[in-house]
Amino acid sequence: MTKSRLEAFSDGVIAILITIMVLDLKMPEREPAWTWRAVLDTGIVSRLWMYVLSFVYLGIYWNNHHHLLQRTESVSGGILWANLDLLFWLSLFPFATGWWGENHFATVPTAVYGVVLLCAAIEYFVLQWVIVARQGPDSALARALGSDWKGKLSPLLYAAAIGLAFVSRWVALGIYIAVALIWLVPDRRLERGFGA
Amino acid sequence: MTKSRLEAFSDGVIAILITIMVLDLKMPEREPAWTWRAVLDTGIVSRLWMYVLSFVYLGIYWNNHHHLLQRTESVSGGILWANLDLLFWLSLFPFATGWWGENHFATVPTAVYGVVLLCAAIEYFVLQWVIVARQGPDSALARALGSDWKGKLSPLLYAAAIGLAFVSRWVALGIYIAVALIWLVPDRRLERGFGA
Amino acid sequence: MTKSRLEAFSDGVIAILITIMVLDLKMPEREPAWTWRAVLDTGIVSRLWMYVLSFVYLGIYWNNHHHLLQRTESVSGGILWANLDLLFWLSLFPFATGWWGENHFATVPTAVYGVVLLCAAIEYFVLQWVIVARQGPDSALARALGSDWKGKLSPLLYAAAIGLAFVSRWVALGIYIAVALIWLVPDRRLERGFGA
Amino acid sequence: MTKSRLEAFSDGVIAILITIMVLDLKMPEREPAWTWRAVLDTGIVSRLWMYVLSFVYLGIYWNNHHHLLQRTESVSGGILWANLDLLFWLSLFPFATGWWGENHFATVPTAVYGVVLLCAAIEYFVLQWVIVARQGPDSALARALGSDWKGKLSPLLYAAAIGLAFVSRWVALGIYIAVALIWLVPDRRLERGFGA
């Protein structure tokens, strides 16, 4: 029962985060007449794409979190707090996305977006580690995770992107998109390993 | 269990969307004294009606989504992502509604509202298709859906409305209202087909 | 199962409404130094009391809705839509509260607040009526509701308050507070009638 | 079942509160170019730390609320309303945090933050007391709570901090942080007492 409430709370927070980002999608003040050209000049298209990227990232976290908790047998205080840590970093997505969007891919906001991605990835790793530690290295979960190359590679790529943002923010953006694509394939390991 | 978490997450997102639209219902800055006339001059009445329309649309999606998932036996990665796609397009309702409302039925916002409706309808169709594909053409769900004329007609009507918005936005608005009315009758097929 | 999803969705919407009202509690722009006097001059205290009033009203609706659905045996399409109607009117609470608060109990906003209260009360009555109609006049729910004098008296009082707001908004405010106090006693009928 | 809906509603409200605080984390209007120095000048770092503090506090409340309700056997009207009272005070966290953050630890906002902490702590105490009163002084819950020194000490420390804010707001801030650290250790009493 503890677990179901943890899932419900996490779902609630992620559901709110994934939707309040849309509150930043605001058109500038009313013009005498909107034309397609005027719409494009507001930069709404690039903001929409950033929203898509963050939506996909939060969707990935929800998806993987869902699979991870499904394989979790019991919940300890440590798991509760590791989970809250993860939710904290996810909660910065709307802020990072909104600020990035307002500044049309400027360098510092691009790097800050990467910092949020990096910290969230590390926290997810910690949460996973706490759960695996509780269930033992021979547990079904530990075997299903295997080498977890995605989980180990992502933080490295984010860290690289943060540095590369100062060379070219397009490279950083490319890396963020690439990592999202790597994860978009849902965590088949967990599905497959248990025939779910 | 997977299914119940998918339902809970979708409910959470739709519940948030249906309520944050109200955040855009703001009166302009304080006047020395509000009269009924001053209230009408703010255009709040037309914004309220747009809010009603979007509220009804999200209610329809929630309702149909609810019936669809009730007949879904198991959840795959494909269903998870088709569901997230649908939620993404639904999440643009507050943006599209707010922008439309601020511009008093201007042409381009009217068309953009139709684009959001169209994409959401297509994604719902895809979600339904993924679920039916998984359960087989002879499944109870497939039989209950039948010809699904509503699901096929709606995107065509939305597409027509987007084009017609440039002729007369009132025609487009009329089509959006008409489609909502078509759907307001809850999906009796699914209820009837299963005696629910 | 249908019922539990209806409850979950309604809870989600009411939980969001009860919390987003707080987004309107904003202090004006930063001053060089805040003193208690400066705080009082912002009118935050009267806004806080309005927030309390709306919070209590939404709490009452959640509470009564909770008892009502607990006694509901099955959910029909009509109940789903009556419930959405109720949620729609409840969703106007943040708007009505925020506007009222910004205008320090001005006449028209006071009356509009009453209109929202009135419509929500009527919709609750309709929802209750739809559920009772489905379960029959001899059902335990119908007997537990009894004469439902609170449910019948409240709309009359709200209607009176809307008219009286134009004579004195303090009378209207007094009526809103009085009706809340009448309801603050949770619906003992339902609790008692079933030994819950 | 009543209890599960109470938990779900409380979880929903706390999940929303913990995430809408992030809506106040907004960067000022766009500058020609963001540098790290420009970011620091916005005071975003101190606002982030305040957000962290409030996030931790809400996390603590969620965590303890979760343990408390897990040990609650049945729900009465009094518990419902004591719970709503607690949620009301928690709902003022985003307001108090946002205002505090905008004013860079000014004296009056620092004290107001303490008032919200104090009232929430008192309401939690009341909720706990109502539940214990219902289950009897010999119940497992009452024994597990024991002397409840944390619950009794916290309000005293908050009250002290409110007064000390007028001497030095750093002392007040230090006390808020210290109390959070005291609670960060999850309520082992309840976990231990029941082998959960």
Image (spheres, coloured by chain):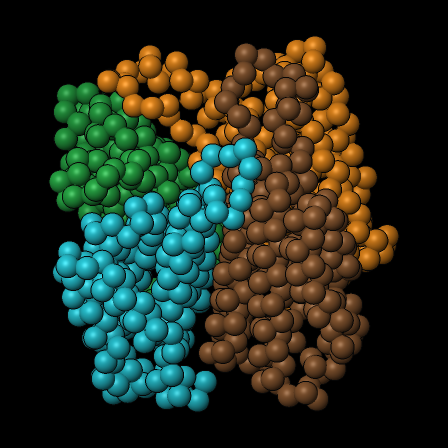
Chain colours: A brown, B orange, C green, D cyan
**Which residue appears at 19% of the width and 64% of the height?**
D161
Answer yes or no: is residue D75 visible. Answer: no
Q: Is residue C173 left or right of residue B8?
A: left
Question: Looking at the image, is D150 positioned above or below residue D83?
Answer: below
The number of discs equals: 0
Q: Residue at x 49, y 66 (%)?
A: A84
Q: Is residue B78 visible?
A: yes
Q: Nearer the viewer, residue A158 or A78?
A: A158
In-front residue for pair B112/B170 = B112
Residue D26 higher or lower than B79, as above or below: above
Query: Closer to the camera, C180 or C123?
Result: C180
User: Which quarter of the rendered picture does the C terminus of chain A lie within?
Assistant: bottom right
Image position, residue D52 (x, y; %): 41, 60
Residue D177, image x, y percentages: 31, 67
Residue D167: x %, y % from top left: 15, 59
Q: Position of residue B117 (x, y in %)?
A: 67, 32
Q: Is residue A164 above or below residue A47?
A: below
Side of C109 relative to C181 (left or right) = right
The answer to whether residue D60 is left or right of residue A61 is left
Nearer-the-camera pick, A29 or A171: A171
Q: Residue at x 38, y 83 (%)?
A: D188
Q: Residue at x 63, y 30 (%)?
A: A43
